[in-house]
Amino acid sequence: METTRKRIAVFSGPTATVQNTVPLVTSNKARRKYGLPLLTRRDGTPIAHDQLRPQRLAARVTVYVRQFSAHPLEHDAAELYGPPDGYVDAHGVFSRDRRGEADVAVYEVTLDPDDGLYLLPYMARQADGKPWDDDTAHPGAPAHLSRQPFLPDASRLFEEIDRFGLHEVSGMNNLLSGKSDFDFIRVVPSAGYKKGRSAAERTDLGEGDIAPERIGEDFFNYRPFHLWRDPPRHSMARVVNTVQAAMDSGKYAGGIWLEGSPNMEESLFWMNLLIDTALPICGNSSQRPHGSIGNDGDHNVADSVDWILSDAWKDDSGCNAAGVVAVLDQLVYTAREVQKADARPGGYVATGGHGGIIGSMGHAPGAPVLTFVPSRRHTRNSAVNLRRLPATVDGVVRVNGEVKTSPVSVKDEQGWLLPSALPEVRFVKSARYLPASSDVSDEGEVEILARIAKNLRDAPLAGFVAEGQAGNAKIVRPMDTALRRAVFSGMPVVRVGRGNAEGIIPADRTGLMIGGGNLTANKARILLMACMLKLGCVPPAADASNPTPAEVAAVKARVAEYQAIFDTH
């Protein structure tokens, strides 16, 4: 029988609050059982209710649920209900018929391990018998004495959303599996298997056993906070290659990328530029951990499924007109413009002052609407997507005191992005009253000069993003002088306005630096990195402080190529 069910790829990215759970705290039910100090309220009395955590039953059990206990007004409409299954007396004995005035009407329910997760008191303790009060055995505990609150992939997240998430109108659950099938792919995940995992136990898409994984190398978390790890730059190649392979497989209707809210915008813009696909890709983050009060991430995930399964994103040819988007708080943001503004639900903004919110999930989930189509090039039309990148480009190095170009491999023989190719792009920031004197020389710009020297030694592809004044991106003269030295050393420089500038920063009037348009500094960095993989370095001058007219012309010609991409992406 032919099925119309579609399959979605779900990618786990770093520090993803969507996959972060609140601490597993030993319940008072367990503390009473083992004679441990109870959890108390501020006045010192025991807490009124144990927190319940999703867990699995080990054996079948029969429970009796008090009739009319699901809502305070059920009893008010008692005549609309069928009879109970029986009654429980004061001694807890069940019978089918009422035997006394004090008997309580109940429903008889058999709970089975195959039912899935149930909300139950958390009974676990530490190995030494102490209760768990947080993620760690003690404040500042090392990794081997700490638990991981993040989920290793999104399979458990989706199971819990399906089990406990309810549609606000119908009251039904199965909000995800009722619509689509999913594959869970660990790209640069937020948690890992420190002891490894057998192939039979895997819940993600992959073959063979998972070898023991290391924090900061294989997975990237932010809790426990003292063990925070960020992914290194070369991880960006793995993001591109993994997502591109999935989108090329023909198995999926689209993809969902999960990452922490402060940084998701950079990953989404990177994919918007590098991934060659006509399929939709959505990004989801969460301002609050999964399972906490007011958690927004679960709803964002469900909305992304609806966006992918809808036709809202399609153009007349059936291809994705919107590019990579962020689906957050029932709004659809372009990857180029979305930015986190505050750590609260609704704390996202569209930067640049010219659009950015292009759709809405509506007030009836499952009915997304695309209201604007971005004019900037993206995904399959991007000039810098993976398939349009060359195999090699020119980088720049210093050999025996001489600055010269040197080939840099961008892709391997199979056409995948090489981690070693990722450019080194750093920020510099201008400000009023920054120079120490009225001198315009670059001698005082030690950070920039040191970075130029290090780039020439270690990073054949390198550049700078300079954040200057709002409106014109002007930077102080010493910094401008130092950055021009960088340009003639083979390193392109992009100028942007500070903050979330709404004006369009044009091409530099000298033709030596790239105008960043209305991009933020972080987004300009991502685009500059992509451009360098396409165009390589700026032609270096023999003497960066005194270029010849021909060398100046060569730089201007290459910067114009960069500018053309910045103006259209």
Image (tube, rainbow, N blue to C red):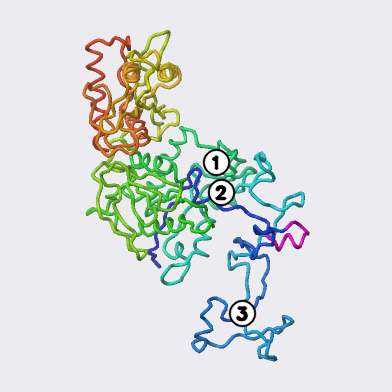
Three-letter amino acid code of the residue under disc 2: Phe
Residue indicated by mark 3 = 66
Q: How would you rate the neighbour count of disc 1 (Cα within 10 Å): few for under 14, some for 14-19, many for 20 or more? A: many
Query: Residue visible at 39% across and 12% down?
Result: 443
| Total numbered labels | 3
Query: Residue visible at 28% across and 26% down?
Result: 474
Q: Secondary structure at mark 2?
A: loop
Nearest the viewer among 327 and 2 is 327
User: x%, y% of residue 8?
Assistant: 42, 55
Q: Earlier in the sequence, mark 1 or mark 3?
A: 3
Residue indicated by mark 2 = 150
**Within the magenta stretch, is there residue 36?**
yes
Residue indicated by mark 1 = 219
Q: Which residues are magenta?
A: 27-37
**Residue 332, numbered circle:** none
User: x%, y% of residue 41?
Assistant: 65, 59
Three-letter amino acid code of the residue under disc 3: Arg
Q: Secondary structure at mark 3?
A: strand
Of circles 1 and 2, which is in front? Answer: 2
Of circles 1 and 3, which is in front? Answer: 3
Q: Earlier in the sequence, mark 3 or mark 2?
A: 3
Q: Earlier in the sequence, mark 1 or mark 2?
A: 2
Disc 1, disc 2: CB below 8 Å?
A: yes
Query: Is residue 104 found left or right of 296 in the rendered image?
Result: right
